[in-house]
Image: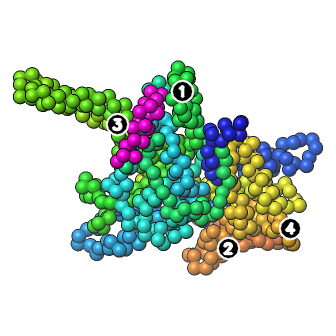
Amino acid sequence: MASKATTQFTVDVEDTRHVSMNIDSCKRMCEDAFLSSSVTSSSSSSISGAEKKKFSDFVSLIRGIVHYEHQTKRDALREGFDASSGLLPKRRKDAKSDARSPTEHERVSVQFVTQFCQMMATAEYTLLSASEWDVAMEEDFMFRLPMTIDWEKGGYDVSLMKAFLKKNPELKVGLPTFSERVLLFKRGVTTSTHADLFIAEKIDLLLEYALKRPVGKVLRKAFGLGFGSSSSKGEESAFAAGGPGRSGGKRKVSKIERKTLRRLMPTIASVLKNVHKKLELSEPTFKEVILLYREDKIDAAEAQFLNVPSGAGPLRLKSFQNVPMADLEMVFPGVKICAKFIDYLTNGITMVLVLFSLIWAFITGEALSERAMQLLTVAGGKLSASWANIQKSKANYAAQMSKEVMKKMDSSGFAVLASVSTDMEEQETKEMILAYAAMRGNKSGMTIEELDDRLEQALMDAFGIAVDFDVHGSVKKLVEEGLASKIPGDSGMYQVVPIEKALKKLDKKWDALFEYSSSSKGGGAGSSEKSVLDANAEEDPSKMERDLLLQLANADTERGKEALKLTKKMDELNEKIADASGSLRKVNWRYS
């Protein structure tokens, strides 16, 4: 029974591969979780200041090298985004035109989407799957307004995403059908909770159970209409049924608590029983959501500022934070808000009564009488007022949705690209730091599975989050940098090099990023001779000392020669002064 109750209030959600922590927090976590436990000194359980300094330098070198290696990717992404969004500056008419043709623009746009998806994968974002979309559409959370997404007339371009998915067919399987128009990326999972009486929502739910569902069932049987379905949300099917469908295989899932009004009160009796009680709702929530899509045409007001070939719209990037799964559809462009069932019910009853009165007037023969004319005037006013009330309700709901979207929206355009580029670098850096620190204290080595379990348990202990750590990618990067190696044999174990050796390897790579030292040939007048430190940087200390003493001795000899010259000049000057003084005395005696 307990198991059934637990299943009733949970849904399966993929574990996140991202924990919101900066590099410094990651470093402190490594010091606390891994480095302290590897200290062998019995007198203290904490690492020394020297060890902290070494690990801090290790982190700084890794961070700098990763940043440098991603520079080309960042520049390519910026150029591709500017070209796809029409942000490249327009050339003068009298200058040689470098404008791209529509075909070239389409190729560059598809290339940018491909590069962007690769960057999102590195930053540990994942595409929303069809199964996740189905779970999101099953329920309502805090935003309980009936809405539909107009995919056909919502301003979405279809050609770009179709061309991208055609070029990457492995991504197409398992995605929702709207992925031909917009790609939705998400990262990080948490739980949102909200407690209240929810009086208005309980009344809506009671009307749905008592009237909307029965009437809808009758209409569906009689006329095949979809009115009155249990969920007001639209349905989206997958491109292909079965399996996760995305590249990378299945990922770990966790059961996240979902308590909605429909799950807490599934019947009329349960609604009446809890109508006066305060309820607490909970819903799986994506910490970060990013939309990528292209508009089908350029807005007239923007056309003068954008450099986009004719027939193509600008590319759009939008990011949101803390979006509940059940409210996910509100972040999409082209959302249409409908009036609630209670709005149609109250105004519909008024319309029915007015129409019935008019029909009755015609039946009784009073259609042309003065009373009938008054009734007709009142009926017209009532019908107009009812229609206006419905439109007003829709406008109020639309304003409410816009307010909620503004709360969730984080940034758009290039700000999203810059933020994700930074996340991409930090994610790779943190993965390498965590993997190295976890393996450092184990001299006998660790298998991939052991390392994965240790890292995920450490992250769970530190943050209370179930993380699906990308251990294979982390170990691969450490091996490529020469910081880890596979132990010979069939054990499948890996071990990392000591911190001192790791620092030397990283420092050598950092120094070799640019080769413009003073020893390079053809570097100017001062490049023909090495400075003392450059010439002897890689030689033994004794030879360096002998060379320095020799140069100092040579310098002393030169200074002695210069001093001798100055002495001779001083003697010559003194002789001239003495001759001048003797002549002056003779002049004074002659005129005295």
Q: Residue at x 80, y 49 (%)?
A: 34
- Which class describes the residues within 10 Å of circle 4: few (<14), some (14-19), or many (20+)? few
Residue position for label 3: 339
- Which class describes the residues within 10 Å of circle 2: few (<14), some (14-19), or many (20+)? some
Alpha carbon distance from label 4 to label 3: 64 Å
Q: Main secondary structure of the magenta part?
A: helix
Tell which of 347 and 72 is nearer to you. Answer: 347
Residue 18 in sight from this viewpoint: no
Check whether the beta carbons of the residues at disc 1 and disc 4 lie within 8 A of each other: no
Which label sits in the foreground, 2 or 1?
1
Tell which of 429 and 149 is nearer to you. Answer: 149
Alpha carbon distance from label 1 to label 4: 62 Å
Tell which of 323 and 234 is nearer to you. Answer: 234
Tell which of 495 and 156 is nearer to you. Answer: 156
Alpha carbon distance from label 1 to label 3: 26 Å
Residue position for label 1: 269
Residue position for label 2: 530
As shown in the figure, which amino acid type bears the numbered disc 3? Answer: Ala
As shown in the figure, which amino acid type bears the numbered disc 1? Answer: Ala
Which label sits in the foreground, 3 or 2?
3
Residue farthest toward the front in the current orientation of the protein: 364
Which label sits in the foreground, 1 or 3?
1
As shown in the figure, which amino acid type bears the numbered disc 4? Answer: Ser
Q: Is residue 531 magenta?
A: no
From the top left corner, tell me how far across and down residue 345 is, in percent. 33, 31
Q: Secondary structure at mark 1?
A: helix
Which of the two labelled residues, at mark 4 and mark 2, occupies the earlier sequence position?
Answer: 4
Q: Residue at x 55, y 68 (%)?
A: 170
Which corner quadrant holds the N terminus?
Answer: top right
Report the span colored magenta: 201-223
From the top left corner, tell me how far across and down residue 73 is, in percent. 53, 65
From the top left corner, tell me how far across and down residue 121 is, in percent. 58, 60
